[in-house]
Image (spheres, helix red, strand yellow):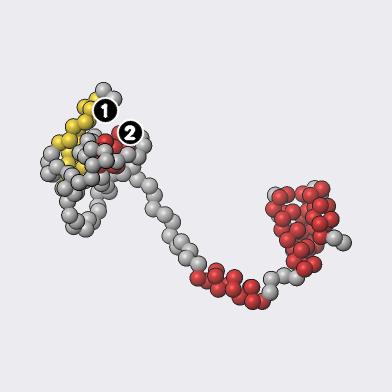
Amino acid sequence: MNIDNEVAILTQMATRDLQTRFAEVFGESTHVHNRTWLIKRIAWRIQALADGDLSERARQRAAELANDADLRLAAPKAKTSGAIPARTTHCPRQRDSRLPEPGTIITRAYKGQDLQIKVLQTGFEFAGHVYASLSAVAKEITGSHCNGYLFFRLVQKGHDQ
C-alpha cells in the first residue's frame, strides 16, 4: 500500500481506531486521545517501517548530541519586584558618577505626585522598599521598563557622561 494513501486513511479514522492502529504499528497500546499526535506518530512509524529507520551512524550522532546538550538542572529563580532581599552579598564596585551621594533625596514630580527616592550606599529606597537600581524604582512607579537615570532626570537624553 502507498504511504500517502495510508496517511490519508489515518486522517479519516476515529480516535479509538487510531489507538488500535498505534498498537498495531508500535506493538504496544497507548492511552493518548490526541488525534493529531496519534496521526503524526503512526505516519512516522509507517514511513520508518517502509523506508527504513535512522542509520546506526545517525543514531550514534543523535546520542552524542543528547549527551552534550546543556540541560538546565535547576529551575529558574523566581522573579522579584525589584526589591533587594534582606540578605544579599554585594561585590564592591565603583560608584556611578551620575548618582548623587548616599543620603541624598531625589525628587521627581510624576502624575500629580511628588516622588522622593533616597539614595543609599547599595541601592535606592522608595515607599519603604529598597531597590537595586533606579530603573527598578522607575519600573515600580510607571509599570513599564524605562531608564532610571532618564526618568529621574539625572542625565539628559542623548548626552553620555
- At x 23% / y 27%, what residue is drawn? 109
Mark 2 residue element: helix
Q: CA distance from mark 2 to mark 1?
A: 9 Å
Q: Nearer the viewer, residue 129 or 45?
A: 45
**Residue at 80% across / 62% down in the picture?**
24
Q: Are dots 2 and 1 in contact, CB under 8 Å? A: yes
Amino acid type at mark 1: Tyr
Whole-percent x, y for residue 29 in the image: 74, 60
Which of 88 and 12 lies nearest the eye of the viewer?
12
Which mark is on residue 110? Answer: 1
Is 159 positioned to the left or the right of 60 in the image?
left
Q: Does 85 sit left or right of 121 as displayed?
A: right
Q: Is residue 9 above or below residue 154?
A: below
Q: Which residue was labeled with disc 2?
A: 142
Question: Which one is nearer the viewer's eye here, 18 or 92?
Answer: 92
Q: Which residue type carries mark 2? A: Thr
On the image, the x and y values in percent for residue 112 come to 26, 23
